[in-house]
């Protein structure tokens, strides 16, 4: 089988730059694809953290003026991967986040920052940037959505566009179009025009050779008016080229048997270490150190999408069952304030850290008894996959990738010995409360709980199967283009 060369283009890469699961996927997929005879080089923006991590960087191409200043393409290694970096200081070397300034406002030049990333990807893909010439390009999320458009209109290699979260679309005013270097024909409903403006994600979805998203159920949901967020018609039109490929997690990073961030590593065969981790978690967040208390955990952005307002409203039901809550997250100010107040009013019962702490994220997975993910929509979700691997039984809404990854411990599943968590639908406070109470009922049967926990920890959550699906899709796309 011929080894394929794939250029992966993304705006984030764990552990260098991360705002969500995109970074984890982009970091883990190349190693998994290596086992499928696919060699990946990843193109990233030259943020300060990326440039600092770049090893043996060598210039392979340059731009005299790329949206307001000179830029270079560097190739080297970072985070253990073969990477290219778009070194454009005027676009990426600045304080703040990858998309927002220090005050939390979107950078006013985001349209051109990520047009530049796509333009650089097209230069590489079309063989104008050194020795690496890919057979296929894999573009991730709206920040790279113009790349399939450039390749389509310039006769470049085939492309695959992945939607990680359809809520983020990259929409800009129509005046941006004249700066993008696309032909006039691209300004159409079949090109980059989207409701009278320029749609970056829309461009990728319309013009890539294939479109993927990160779970089969989410791929079905976004074809509907309820879940499509304005894209449902286009996605139905592209139905034959739309594929749901479930995400995995990096099981070398997320492995309770070797996790150096846990006080007491453990495994499915020898889970006793969870007791010490639970006590450490309770102590860390000021909870009463009680092994008998059912400890729910949350590691999440605190947003409406994630359903954390429902959990805040359901706290009386959770606490009424003599349970505890350990929460780590940041997001909407009202939710941050709400959980902070709940911790203050319920000392020893509710503990929260507003922000992000990698060590605490691992400790919640390794010490909580159950992990709550009440999302209103969820393309895939990674936190519930980590919870399965760590034996924190997921309590999830029956949506998107959550529905694809958890086996509900209903009566028939329990009788068959196959449950791995608790699911609820519809996504309302009442149904979440019922799921929390059902979880408490399972907790009161220790032997059953341990069996469900073993089931969860033995679930396959690695990238092995998803990588095989991606490799097969790449080869199918190339074969279709060659036909």
Image (spheres, rainbow, N blue to C red):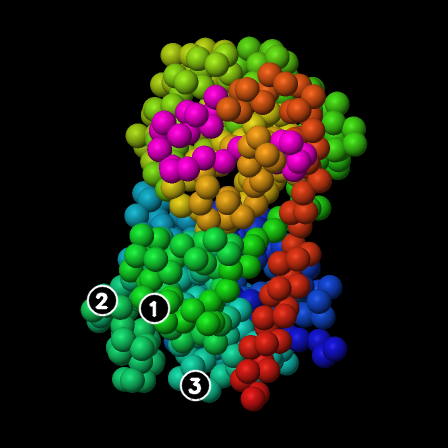
Tag 2 residue: 195
Q: Residue at x 45, y 35 (%)?
A: 424
Residue 154: which disc? 3
Q: Residue at x 54, y 48 (%)?
A: 404
Q: Is residue 349 magenta?
A: no
Residue 356: which disc? none
Distance (Cα) linking label 2 and label 1: 13 Å
Whichever of callouts 3 and 2 sits on the residue coming sooner in the sequence is 3
Question: Is the residue marked by circle 1 packed among few (<14), some (14-19), or many (20+) residues within 10 Å?
Answer: some
Q: Position of residue 442 (x, y in %)?
A: 58, 22
Distance (Cα) linking label 3 and label 2: 25 Å
Between residues 97 and 332, which one lies in front from this camera angle? 332
For the C terminus, the quadrant is bottom right
Between residues 193 and 314, which one lies in front from this camera angle? 314
Distance (Cα) linking label 1 and label 3: 23 Å
Q: Are marks 3 and 2 in contact (CB under 8 Å)?
A: no
- Where disc 2 sits, the SS reads loop
- Where disc 3 sits, the SS reads helix
Q: Is residue 424 magenta?
A: yes
Residue 234: which disc? 1
For the N terminus, the quadrant is bottom right
Residue that sits furthest to the bottom in the current view = 483
Looking at the image, can residue 72 be seen?
A: no
Whichever of callouts 1 and 3 sits on the residue coming sooner in the sequence is 3
Left or right, residue 157 beside residue 70:
right
């Amino acid at each position: 089988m011929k080894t394929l060369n794939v250029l992966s283009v993304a705006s984030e890469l764990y552990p260098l730059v991360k705002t969500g699961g995109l970074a984890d996927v982009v970091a883990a997929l190349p190693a998994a694809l290596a086992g499928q005879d696919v060699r990946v080089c990843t193109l990233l923006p030259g943020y300060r953290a990326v440039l600092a991590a770049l090893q043996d960087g060598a210039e392979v191409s340059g731009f005299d003026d790329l949206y307001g200043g000179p830029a270079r393409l560097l190739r080297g290694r970072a985070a253990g991967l073969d990477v290219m970096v778009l070194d454009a200081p005027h676009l990426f070397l600045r304080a703040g986040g990858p998309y927002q300034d220090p005050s939390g406002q979107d950078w006013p030049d985001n349209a051109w920052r990520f047009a530049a990333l796509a333009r650089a990807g097209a230069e590489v893909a079309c063989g104008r940037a050194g020795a690496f010439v890919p057979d296929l390009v894999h573009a991730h999320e709206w920040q790279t959505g113009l790349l399939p458009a450039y390749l389509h209109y310039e006769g470049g290699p085939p492309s695959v566009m992945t939607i990680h979260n359809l809520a983020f679309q990259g929409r800009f005013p129509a005046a941006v179009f004249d700066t993008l270097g696309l032909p006039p024909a691209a300004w159409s409903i079949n090109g980059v025009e989207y409701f009278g403006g320029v749609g970056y994600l829309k461009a990728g979805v319309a013009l890539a050779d294939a479109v993927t998203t990160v779970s089969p159920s989410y791929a079905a949901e976004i074809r509907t008016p309820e879940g499509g967020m304005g894209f449902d018609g286009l996605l139905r039109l592209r139905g034959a080229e739309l594929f749901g490929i479930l995400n995995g997690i990096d099981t070398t990073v997320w492995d309770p048997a070797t996790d150096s961030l846990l006080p007491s590593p453990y495994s499915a065969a020898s889970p006793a270490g969870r007791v010490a981790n639970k006590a450490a978690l309770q102590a860390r967040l000021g909870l009463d150190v009680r092994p008998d208390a059912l400890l729910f955990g949350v590691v999440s952005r605190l947003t409406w999408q994630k359903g954390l307002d429902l959990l805040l409203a359901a706290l009386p039901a959770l606490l009424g069952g003599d349970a505890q809550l350990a929460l780590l997250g940041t997001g909407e100010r009202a939710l941050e304030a709400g959980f902070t107040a709940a911790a203050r009013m319920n000392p020893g019962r509710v503990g929260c850290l507003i922000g992000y702490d990698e060590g605490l994220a691992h400790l919640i997975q390794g010490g909580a008894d159950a992990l709550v993910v009440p999302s209103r929509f969820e393309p895939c979700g990674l936190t519930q996959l980590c919870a399965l691997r760590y034996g924190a039984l997921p309590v999830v809404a029956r949506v998107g990738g959550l529905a694809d990854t958890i086996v509900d411990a209903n009566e028939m599943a329990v009788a068959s010995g196959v449950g791995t968590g608790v699911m609820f639908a519809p996504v309302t406070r009442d149904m979440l409360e019922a799921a929390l109470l059902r979880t408490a009922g399972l907790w009161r049967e220790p032997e059953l709980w341990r069996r469900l926990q073993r089931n969860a920890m033995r679930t396959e959550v690695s990238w092995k199967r998803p990588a095989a699906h991606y490799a097969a899709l790449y080869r199918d796309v190339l074969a279709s283009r060659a036909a």
